[in-house]
Amino acid sequence: MSFPEKVLSLLAQIPPSKVTTYAELARAAGRPKAWRWVGRILSQNSEPDKYPCYKVVKSDGTLGGYSRGLNEKIRRLEKEGIKTKNKRVDLNKHFHKFK
């Protein structure tokens, strides 16, 4: 499986009401320093409903980007019960770490 395929596969495994980070996805996909590549992969995601890239945030909890706009990212997160404050997610409460 290629690195982009691993990233998308992991993305589909994030449970409801949880988010992960670009760095965590890179680590779990086997390339811990490739967090920028993860961002590029997600920006080209043509199936955001199948691969929920809105569930990926920066390591400090800030939202980062989303192809459908920041307001849509916030809407989707809040639909799952993930509240944002000052465009940030509480990672202590909502972080998903892959095994």
Image (cartoon, rainbow, N blue to C red):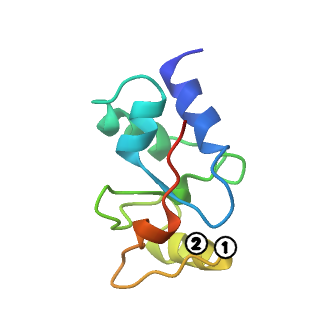
Kindly indicate the quadrant of the structure image that contains residue 58: bottom left
Q: Residue at x 39, y 85 (%)?
A: 85
Local secondary structure at mark 1: loop
Q: In the figure, 87 relative to 60: above or below?
A: below
- Residue 77, numbered label: 2
Amino acid carrying label 1: it is: Glu
Local secondary structure at mark 2: helix
Do the numbered discs 1 and 2 sit on residues whose CB atoms are within 8 Å? Answer: yes
Q: Residue at x 31, y 55 (%)?
A: 59
Kindly indicate the quadrant of the structure image that contains residue 63: bottom left
Q: Residue at x 51, y 66 (%)?
A: 94
Residue 35 % position (x, y) = 33, 38
Q: Residue at x 56, y 76 (%)?
A: 82
- Could you tell me which quadrant the N terminus lies in? top right
Kindly indicate the quadrant of the structure image that contains residue 78: bottom right
Res. 46 visible in picture: no
Q: In the figure, 92 relative to 95: above or below?
A: below
Q: CA distance from mark 1 to mark 2?
A: 5 Å
Q: In the figure, 49 relative to 73: above or below?
A: above
Q: Residues within 10 Å of mark 1 (few under 14, many from 20)?
A: few
Q: Residues within 10 Å of mark 2 (few under 14, many from 20)?
A: many
Amino acid carrying label 2: it is: Leu
Q: Is 75 placed left or right of 67 in the picture?
A: right
Q: Is 46 placed left or right of 39 in the picture?
A: right
**What residue would you read off at disc 1?**
80
- Residue 36, numbered label: none
Residue sitting at the far right:
50
Residue 26 % position (x, y) = 40, 34
Residue sitting at the far bottom:
85
Res. 97 visible in picture: yes
Residue 99 % position (x, y) = 55, 36
Residue 95 % position (x, y) = 48, 59
